[in-house]
Amino acid sequence: MNKINYKTLFFIILMIGLITYLSFTFKIASQTANKLYEVYLSGKKIGLITSSNELYNLIDEEQTEIKEKYGVDKVYPPSGLEIQSVMTYKNKALSAKQIYEEIKDIEPFTIEGYEVSIKLDKGNKKFYILNKEDLDIAIKNTILAFISEEEYNNYLSGKEVDITEEGKEITDIYFDKEVTIKKTYISTEENIITNANDLSMFFLFGTTNLTDKYEVKAEDTIETIAYKNELGVSDFLIANPEIAGENALLAIGQKVTVAGIDPVSNIVVESFETENLSISYDTKLVYDKNLDASKTYTKQEGKKGLAKVTYATKEMNGVILTTAQVNEEIISEPIDKIVVVGAKNVVYYGNTTYWAWPTSKPFRISSHFGYRIHPIYKESRLHNGTDITGTKSDNIYAIQSGTVTSVGYNGSSGNYIYIKHNDTYTSTYLHLRKQLVKVGDKVEKGQLIGIMGNTGASTGKHLHLGLIKNGKYVNALTLYQ
């Protein structure tokens, strides 16, 4: 038996391997590489197609329902769809229809539009629109909810208003938060606002569907409806633009909207405003010890005065934040009414027939008693007093004789004073810079008790005057009617 020549065997095996390798290599080299497109959805590989445009066109052709719903001409792939061109020796590719059927129920398709972003203290608030022009209209409509169209047009044109006469010159209008807009592809699962009217509503109320309705009853007024539904009268009128004003008559059974405004970003208006303001007269009591206690008579009739006052004012959503006198011209001084009261065998203390005004005159009411969106806490709350501002002097006076029952400070009221006048009434004075009385003091009507300030939860210098009647807060202005 012949011995195996190992060198010969190794050479034979090597040659066989080389021939096999070369035959395989030349076979591959003889094939042509194909350009195909790999489709991915949210990072997951879906398959190969021969044309990306064919898939895009098919999506656009098939999604007629989306086109009709949004009134658009073109529909685009899902935002998570990626198509990459590849060179491959594979020659089997899926059809565009097969890929479409695979992806149509996984991720929503997109349409072209705009993302609007509101920069908040914590994060951003985003919403989507189709037309940039709708945003311009909505912003204008939001502004016109708080100022007149004439004032707005004067501002846009740069027209100067003669503030030596009655009128308002707006110096600036802006959002209190940064608003940005960018073009993008929007998922059809997003809440997309498709027209200017809905966008205007969204800007004011934070929704495009005002469903809160109220049916007017026989005893209702605009003021009582607003109060029942925790709204300010101005908010009610904004929600019901077809109602002419707060004194408009309502029909029994009429359906009105009772939604509170909740702007996506607050509108701030800065202005100079000149007004002719009446100066109310005070009623002075003179006690006659020779006159029977059941007798009273008017010794002198009162007469209102008149002043022309110019204010620098900053408002947010129609609510005055700060206002300050920049000019005052007294045209006529008020004349006090003098009433003689019988005091024979009687000692009067804290007579509540007539009340003094707590500030100097003239003045402005920046916020009335009733529900409102709180300018700091940003929620609907009962404003249980009357905010008075725009006075020349910061002196605060007791509106009636009485006893000081509370003097202190808290984070909401700031520096405060409470005065009890009798078993029925207690008056409150909030946001003071300084208190000039202490608990237990007996004060006279019209006595200086404090200095107007901006302490506590306050947006500017003012007096919050409150009135408690039989343990319940009521509108203090009813005392002066």
Image (cartoon, helix red, strand yellow):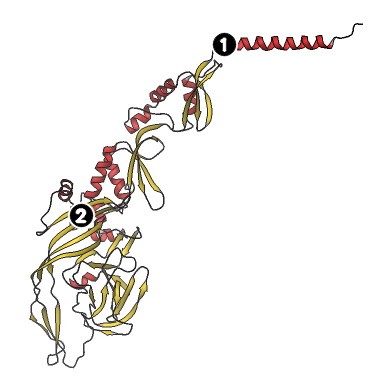
Q: Left of 13 or right of it: where is 197? A: left
Dot 2: few (<14), some (14–19), or many (≥20) neighbours within 10 Å? some
Of callouts 2 and 1, which one flags the residue occurring earlier in the amino acid sequence? 1
Q: Residue at x 10, y 56 (%)?
A: 162
Front one among 371 and 305? 305
Q: Position of residue 317 (x, y in %)?
A: 26, 55
For numbered disc 2, what is the local secondary structure? loop
Q: Quadrant of residue 391?
A: bottom left
Q: Position of residue 257 (x, y in %)?
A: 28, 51
Q: Is residue 27 visible?
A: yes
Q: Considering the image in quadrants, where does the C terminus appear? A: bottom left
Q: Nearer the viewer, residue 454 or 250?
A: 454
Quarter holding residue 137:
top left
Residue 169 in picture, x, y percent from top left: 16, 54
- Secondary structure at badge 1 equals loop
* Residue 274 in the figure: left or right of residue 74: left
- Position of residue 459 measured from the top left corner of the image (x, y, whole percent): 30, 63
Q: Nearer the viewer, mark 2 or mark 1?
A: 1
Q: Please tell me whether residue 22 is drawn above or below residue 255 in the rendered image.
A: above
Q: Pointer 2: what residue?
A: 250
Above/below status of 464 relative to 256:
below
Q: Is residue 423 above or below residue 186?
A: below
Residue type at tag 2: Leu
Work out how far the residue at label 2 is from the one at label 1, CA to CA, in angstroms: 86 Å
Q: Which residue is mark 1?
A: 31
Q: Are marks 2 and 1 in contact (CB under 8 Å)?
A: no
Residue drawn where x is 43% and y is 20% of the image? 54
**Residue at screen point 54% across, 18% down:** 88
Type of amino acid under label 1: Gln
